[in-house]
Image (spheres, rainbow, N blue to C red):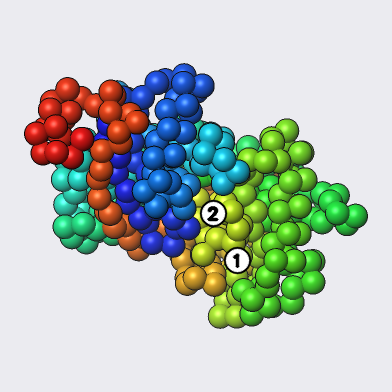
Amino acid sequence: MIGHLAYAADAPCPTFVLDAGRLPREDEPLLARLAQAREYLASAGGAHVLKIALIEPSAHPMFDLDYRFVQALPSGPDRFDLRGSCGHSVLAAVLAASRSGMLPRLVPGARVRVRVRNNGDSVVCEAGQVERDSAGFTVTFVQPSPVPFADLLPAGRPRTVLATGGECVEVSLVASANTYAFVDARTLGVPDQAALFHAGGELLERLESIRGAAADLLGWPRGGAFPKIAAVLPGVDGGIAARAVTVPGWHPSIALTGAVCLGSAVRIPGTVPWRIAREHGTADGLVDITTAGGRTAVSAVTTAAGAPGDEGALLWATVAHKHVTFQGSFALPPLGHLQFEEVAQCLALSGAA
């Protein structure tokens, strides 16, 4: 079997892309194969690669590519979380699919429609500048029909108080692209953007504890990767400053799904991000997100509030200027029996098998 590596800028690590059509469909045998692949990857120096994308041409007429995300956990080669998604890995998967021949070669203006099998998301990846081993994208998470704001609040309300570590912390749990817990960093004693970006292990530990309490509330395992969590406060130059947690520590910037979720949360009345955005008067339109690793802009398009009880709905959310680099393909000896016969023969002739 052939594996591919691609890296989306601002992601914590590259994505390991595999052909889902050559792998088992059931979770238990699938994860056993992925554990073998992960052990081989680690032996080759790729232990830091914790994102896996399983892709195949979509049988659905509205999509080009089916995608399933697997979060590898650092606690062991056979430890995974199948619950959420990853926007950076979607882009890595699109570029790898194009380079491997699963999809046509990318050209500027091409749109690849991706069906996320983890959560049913529809993602449109529009290629901008395309080079030999890289491409830029504008990414839009499209809702098949308007999603009422109430359906984006898994706790049933814009803000929830969680008890953790002997303290009570107010968070907003929002489910858009991924489920996030957003907490106002100032309630944790972090006064401003500079302090947020320079905070170390103590704040990380507190956020992990809050994330664990959020997982308890949702009935999810504490040892998994979801829900995600981010501390937010007003940015120095307007917009929102954010510091997010990933596996296994601080995110270098913010996940693509995190930007989408934060942009959606800004539009939902009463959430923590909604309140923070109003401190700068940036609650509508494009939202600038400042992180320790750079800036990201997201635009969430919603319907206006209507009759009493109808506070609006999410239509789509867009993030532009995302860049992905293809890092190469290689044979996976532990999964060699899963190759196409003609590919196995070519590899045997080349000595690469």
Q: Is residue 169 above or below residue 35?
A: below
Q: Tell me which numbered mark, 2 or 1, is placed earlier along the sequence.
A: 1
Q: Is residue 129 above or below residue 66?
A: below
Q: Amino acid at mark 2?
A: Gly
Q: Does residue 219 show up?
A: yes
Residue 203 picture quarter: bottom right
> In the depicted view, which residue is nearer to us: 317 or 243?
243
Q: Is residue 47 left or right of residue 131?
A: right
> In the depicted view, which residue is nearer to us: 94 or 155?
94
Q: Alpha carbon of mark 2 to alpha carbon of mark 1: how far? A: 10 Å
> In the depicted view, which residue is nearer to us: 259 or 44?
44
Q: Position of residue 346 (x, y in %)?
A: 11, 32
Residue in view at x 40 percent, y 50 percent: 46
Callout 2 touching callout 1 (CB < 8 Å): yes
Q: Does residue 310 show up?
A: no
- Spot the residue most to the left: 349
Q: Is residue 314 above or below residue 183?
A: above
Q: Is residue 349 above or below residue 243?
A: above
Report which residue position mark 1 lands on.
242
Residue in view at x 34 percent, y 41 percent: 17
Residue in view at x 14 percent, y 32 percent: 348
Report which residue position mark 2 lands on.
258
